[in-house]
């Protein structure tokens, strides 16, 4: 950061530089893993000095935290779109193919696997991941409750929570299946998910 930037910070410029670091870190983490990628490697990929990077992120944990926040915002946009539909349950069902394609895209799932792996051994990252999950979980729960009420489908809260966990687990599990079996038949997987999701969402 130049002396001019320090004295007259430009918020938009700072956001762009932060994203520049995150884009570089994503490449490095995907290539070398969280622990294998050094701040020096990230700074080189970002085209800036390590000292410059520390103006935006004070550690690799802070970079991971930013990825967690970005993912929560991404999920929030998806949920916002679902909320706009008159029938949110049908909207979720109709978007299954698009969701499967996204979950099976290596560009999408490589980084989340690194985050999950780090969360399994780093309590700070684990707390961030869990806090983000609570926000998304509660919002999805409200959407499902509204959707089921519109269809006249009452359900005990504990049963709804159980269904939600199963639906989320199926999507998160696709990351691992894509890793183990890169030649997954997307059409077959989507058809199977539709069979599973319809009764979970709509009881039929």
Image (cartoon, rainbow, N blue to C red):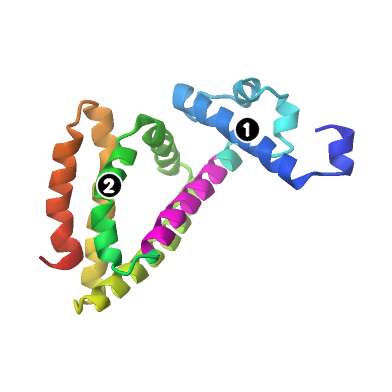
Tell me which label, 2 or 1, sits earlier in the chain: 1
Q: Which residues are magenta?
A: 64-82
Q: Nearer the viewer, residue 84 or 74?
A: 84
**Residue located at (28% from left, 51% from top):** 95
- Quadrant (top left, top right, bottom left, bottom right) of the C terminus: bottom left
Question: Is residue 66 within the magenta segment?
Answer: yes
Residue 74 position (above or below residue 183): below
Q: Which residue is mark 1?
A: 21
Question: Is residue 77 within the magenta segment?
Answer: yes
The spot of residue 97 in percent (x, y) is 25, 45
- Quadrant (top left, top right, bottom left, bottom right) of the N terminus: top right
Name the mark on residue 131: none
Disc 2, SS:
helix
Residue 32 position (above or below residue 171): above
Q: Nearer the viewer, residue 129 or 197?
A: 197
The spot of residue 40 in percent (x, y) is 64, 22
Question: Which is the main secondary structure of the residues drawn in magenta?
Answer: helix
Disc 1, SS:
helix
Q: Is residue 10 left or right of residue 113?
A: right
Q: Which residue is mark 2?
A: 171
Q: Is residue 48 left or right of residue 61?
A: right
């Amino acid at each position: 950061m130049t002396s001019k930037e320090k004295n007259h910070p430009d918020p938009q410029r700072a956001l762009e530089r932060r994203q520049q670091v995150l884009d570089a870190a994503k490449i490095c983490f995907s290539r070398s893993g969280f622990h294998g990628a050094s701040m020096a490697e990230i700074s080189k990929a970002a085209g800036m000095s390590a000292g410059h990077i520390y103006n935006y992120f004070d550690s690799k944990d802070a970079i991971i935290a930013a990825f967690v926040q970005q993912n929560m915002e991404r999920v929030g946009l998806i949920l916002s779109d679902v909320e706009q539909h008159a029938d949110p349950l049908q909207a979720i069902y109709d978007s299954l193919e698009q969701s499967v394609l996204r979950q099976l895209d290596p560009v999408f799932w490589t980084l989340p696997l690194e985050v999950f792996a780090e969360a399994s051994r780093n309590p700070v990252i684990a707390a961030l991941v869990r806090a983000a999950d609570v926000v998304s979980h509660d919002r999805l729960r409200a959407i499902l409750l509204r959707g089921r009420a519109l269809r006249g489908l009452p359900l005990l809260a504990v049963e709804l929570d159980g269904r939600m966990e199963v639906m989320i687990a199926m999507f998160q599990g696709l990351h691992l299946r894509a890793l183990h079996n890169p030649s997954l038949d997307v059409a077959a997987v989507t058809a199977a998910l539709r069979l599973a999701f319809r009764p979970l969402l709509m009881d039929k």
